[in-house]
Amino acid sequence: MGFVEGRVVLITGASSGIGLETSRELARRGAQVVMAARNRERGEQALEDVRRAAATAGSPAPDLLLADLTDPDAIAFLIERVRSRYRRLHVLINNAGGFVARRAVTAEGFEYTYALNVVAPIRLTLGVLGRLRKSRPARIINVASQAHAAGALDLDDLQMERGRYRGFVQYARSKTALILWTRALACELRKSGVTVNAVHPGWIKTAMGASNPPTATAAVFRFATAILARPQIVGARGPVYLADDEQLQQTTGEYYFVTHQRAPAAHARDSEIAGRMLELGRSYDVSATRQRERK
């Protein structure tokens, strides 16, 4: 029996790619899977897929919650839905991510890649952290990328406003930020019964970046993905391992290359910058903002 059997698992970006494969596999392993997705039609199709897997395994029926993770109001609503529907939450997998080849900003004013890859998982995690604490032992898994090695973080230019915008570099920087935040949060939660780890799932054939305009960077990325990337089912191995392996009960603050623990790039191990990311992350907390607004 693995860790997830009989436990509640929330997965973002669950309507396709690694998120869908992870949802399906954890449902097969007995988890009650809560799938967060942006698009209703694709989300409902994925839900039916995971529902069949759960029924075959005799697992609890999965659930679908809709949210655009670049919208703070949508994240706040997602957090409220999770809190109202589930008294316990044992695993959070922040899987949703992406990048844009040309600089774009959200309605809130965040650069899009940073908003989706950094701000969104921080907001969701902080919003449901109370549930995770009450459900301990519990696990937070942040899907990062080995691409972080190409992007040292510049705390003075997190939105890549200076000079020429480079989509892949910003993607790499965003994953560095996520790894640093993971390490700092793990230290803060070390005695809480909640573990926090990051994982590179491998280079996987997903739709990430598919909607980008036909820039040279986007074209190279799509070509390389088509030739070199591995099937989506392979990409679920890392998140599933971190969610379900019983031997990882005390493992926290680590970075995994699929199922192997590795040290991230040196710039993703800087304790001072990690601490600053932790503080910055608190300013993104939509739950705290909403509570202040109600007073």
Image (cartoon, grey):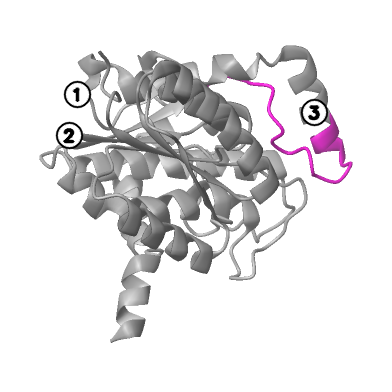
Image quadrant where residue 163 sits = bottom right
Q: Secondary structure at mark 3?
A: helix
Q: Chief secondary structure of the magenta span?
A: loop
- Within 10 Å of disc 3 (Cα), the crowding (few <14, some 14-19, many 20+) is some
Kind of residue sitting beneath label 2: Pro
Label 1, residues with CA under 10 Å away: few <14, some 14-19, many ≥20: some
Q: Which residue is mark 2?
A: 137
Above or below for 231 versus 250: above
Residue type at tag 3:
Arg
Point out the tag, 1 or 3, that comes first from the N-terminus.
Answer: 3
Report which residue position mark 3 lands on. Answer: 222
From the image, which quarter does the C terminus lie in? bottom left
Q: Earlier in the sequence, mark 1 or mark 2?
A: 2
Are discs 1 and 2 less than 8 Å apart at CB? Answer: yes
The N terminus, quarter of image: top left
Considering only vertical position in the picture, is 27 above or below 43? above
In the image, 119 versus 291, the foreground residue is 291
Sequence order check: which comes first, mark 3 or mark 2? Answer: 2
Amino acid marked by disc 1: Gln
Q: What's the CA distance linking mark 1 and mark 3?
A: 37 Å
